[in-house]
Amino acid sequence: MSHAVGDTLPPFTIESVSPQAMKQWAGFLADPNPIHLDVEVVKAKGLGDRVINQGPINVAYMMNMLMRAFPGGRIKSMDSRFLDNVYGGDRAVVTGRIAAIEGDTVTCEFSLDVDGRGTVNSGTATVEI
C-alpha cells in the first residue's frame, strides 16, 4: 500500500464510551479509582456528572486507529498529551494524518476528539510498516 505525507488516516470511532467497560478495565488495570466507577464521587469532586474513562483506555483508542491504518505495523514510539477527560456516554473519534515518512517508518499526528468538547488528547507516533 502506498502512503504519502499529508494522507489522512481512517478514523476510529467509539459511538458511546461504556461505563461497564470502565468497570472491567478497572480490574485489568488494578485501578480502583472511584472516578471511573461511581458518578457520585465524580460529582463530589466537582469533575462532572458522569464517570471518567481511564487514561489507558483513551490511549488504546488511539493505538487501535494506528493499527487499523497500518495492518501488520508496529508502533515504535508514541507520545500523547491528555487535555481533558472522556466521560461515560461520550462519542469519541480518533483521527490522524501522516506527518513524515522515512524508509519503512511513518510518523503520524493524531487527536482524540469528543463530540461537543473538541480535542481531549493529541500526540504523535512512529509506526514501522
Image (cartoon, helix red, strand yellow):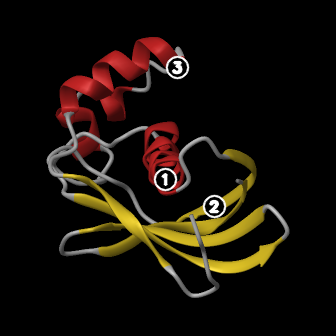
Left or right of 45 on screen, residue 120: right
Q: Amino acid at mark 2?
A: Ser
Residue 116 on image: x %, y %: 18, 75
- Upstream in the sequence, badge 2 or badge 1? 1
Judging by the rendered image, the residue that carries numbered circle 3 is: 29
- Distance from disc 2 to disc 1, alpha carbons, whole Å, reads 9 Å
Q: Amino acid at mark 1?
A: Met
Q: Secondary structure at mark 2?
A: strand
What residue is at 76 percent from the left and 76 percent from the top? Answer: 101
Judging by the rendered image, the residue that carries numbered circle 1 is: 62
Tell me the quarter of the picture where residue 95 sits: bottom left
Q: Secondary structure at mark 3?
A: helix
Judging by the rendered image, the residue that carries numbered circle 2 is: 80
Answer few, some or many: residues within 10 Å of disc 1's Cα (few below 14, many 20 plus, some between 14 and 19).
Answer: many
Residue 29 on image: x %, y %: 52, 19
Q: Are marks 2 and 1 in contact (CB under 8 Å)?
A: yes
Residue 32 on image: x %, y %: 44, 18
Screen quadrant of the N terminus = bottom right
Specify whether residue 122 is in view.
Answer: yes
User: Which labelled disc corresponds to residue 32?
Assistant: none
Answer few, some or many: residues within 10 Å of disc 3's Cα (few below 14, many 20 plus, some between 14 and 19).
Answer: few
Which residue is outermost to the front?
Answer: 1
Left or right of 101 on screen, residue 41: left
Where is 32 relative to 50, above or below?
above
Left or right of 103 on screen, residue 92: left
Q: Secondary structure at mark 1?
A: helix
Residue 56 on image: x %, y %: 52, 38
- Upstream in the sequence, badge 3 or badge 1? 3
Q: Amino acid at mark 3?
A: Leu
Tell me the quarter of the picture where residue 35 sits: top left
